[in-house]
Amino acid sequence: MYTETTLHALQYTIYNIHYTIKKMTNNDIFKKLRVALQLRDDQIVEILELVNFRVSKGELGNIFRNEEHPNYVECGDQLLRNFLNGLVIHLRGTKEAPKNPMEVIKSHKNTPPKDGYVGNDRNEKKEVKPKTETSKKPAPSF
């Protein structure tokens, strides 16, 4: 059916594809989950606190950075494992207080951040306060 050269060419192609595909790191998995679930850093901190794992927003920022950035930090197995365990509790709830996961995911978009700043919503207009007259310096008289 197939000649020997065709099979060798196919094996060589599969070999090249296998080794040219980048292996996904824990950082890549964490970033994809964050985007897919529309989670902000403060929400991720809360999810990790559900399993008694403490991490700061700054540490999370370093995990989500580009690999070439000098402050980039690799996401360890322990952090990703605790995030996934906390995510299960966050989405499903507990036996005593079960939740509907789809409703929880929909609420991510509507929940304002704790500090009141909405950085992800580019279409939302920011409130601009007019400058007061007292903040202007008087014009020099010549």
Image (cartoon, rainbow, N blue to C red):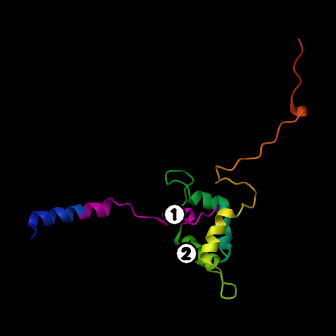
Label 1 is placed on what type of residue?
A: Lys
Pair 2/1: label in front: 1
Question: Eyeballing the image, is 36 above or below 142?
Answer: below
Residue corresponding to mark 1: 32
Above or below, comparing residue 24 to residue 131 in the picture: below
Q: Residue at x 61, y 57 (%)?
A: 61
Q: How many neighbours does mark 2 have within 10 angstroms: few (below 14), some (14-19), or many (20 or more)?
A: few
Q: Is residue 45 left or right of residue 80?
A: right
Furthest-top residue in view? 142
Q: Secondary structure at mark 1?
A: helix
Q: Secondary structure at mark 2?
A: helix
Q: Amino acid at mark 2?
A: Arg
Name which residue lies at 69% across and 84% down: 97
How far apart are labels 2 and 1 at the CA level?
15 Å
Identify the disc placed on residue 124: none
Q: Which residues are magenta?
A: 14-40
Q: Which mark is residue 81?
A: 2
In the rendered image, residue 139, in percent from the top left (x then y), is placed at 87, 20
Mark 2 or mark 1: whose residue is earlier in sequence: 1
Residue 41 percent location from the top left of the image: 65, 62
- Residue 126 lies, in percent from the top left, at 73, 47
Q: Position of residue 75 (x, y in %)?
A: 54, 65
Q: Where is the C terminus found, in terms of image quarters?
A: top right
Question: Residue at horizontal 66%, vertical 68%?
Answer: 107
